[in-house]
Amino acid sequence: MLRTASQPFASGRDPRPLGDIITGEAATMGWTLELAQARLIDQWPQLVGEAMAGHAQVTRIENGVLQVQCDSTAWATELRRLRGEIITRMLREHPEAQVREIRFIRPGAPSWKHGPRSVQGRGPRDTYG
């Protein structure tokens, strides 16, 4: 059996960029959507601005719904008002993340239950935010 010598500078022998290899493997493993969503979460401060991102953190993306936990009801209201603009920017910059809706979640109300014998209150109270 004759063995042919390989040429050191023959075409097709150049190393492939690492990014291309990782992208190919991610597509093979079916991780493309998850990586796109992780990129969107990582880019959230650039999407809404540093000031708003400091008061609204992405908690998860599930079934095309981006859930954002807000520090106060005031921030949740402000972000709801800007929802259309945020979705438009998100679809333009991260279409592969497949997010079609944003849900802004207010902070939880403080617990007024103290001790083993507590009485049901009058209902939810303000978030003091």
Image: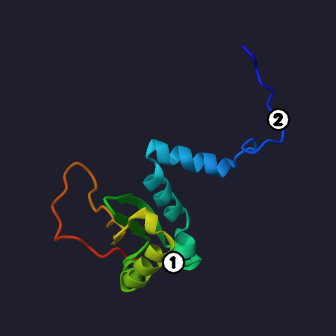
Q: Is residue 104 visible?
A: yes
In the rendered structure, which amino acid carries the disc numbered 1? Answer: Val
Where does residue 111 sit, x and y in percent of width and height?
Answer: 30, 61
Closer to us: 38 or 120: 38
Query: In which quadrant is the C terminus drawn?
Result: bottom left
Q: How is the image coloured?
A: rainbow
Drawn side of residue 5 relative to residue 69, left or right: right
Residue type at numbered disc 2: Gln
Most extreme residue toward the front, as rendered?
2
Residue under pointer 1: 48
Cα–Cα gap, marks 2 and 1: 53 Å
Are circles 2 and 1 on residues that touch, CB within 8 Å?
Answer: no
Does residue 28 appear left or right of residue 121 in this picture?
Answer: right
Q: Position of residue 83 (x, y in %)?
A: 38, 81
User: Farthest right residue?
Assistant: 8
Q: Nearer the viewer, residue 48 or 90?
A: 90
Q: Nearer the viewer, residue 57 or 36?
A: 36
Residue identifier under label 2: 7
Residue 29 is situated, as x and y percent measured from the top left of the image, at 46, 42
- Quadrant location of residue 109? bottom left
Residue appearing at x 42%, y 80% in the figure? 88
On screen, residue 87 above or below 65: below
Closer to the chain start, of discs 2 and 1, is: 2
Tag in front: 2 or 1: 2
Residue located at (50% from left, 54% from top): 35
Considering only vertical position in the picture, is 58 above or below 34? below
Q: Callout 2: few (<14), some (14-19), or many (20+) C-alpha neighbours within 10 Å?
A: few
Please tell me the numbered disc located at residue 17.
none
The residue at 82%/35% (across/down) is 7
Residue 86 position by quadrant: bottom left
Q: Does residue 54 appear in the picture of this structure?
A: no
In terms of secondary structure, where does tag 1 sit?
helix
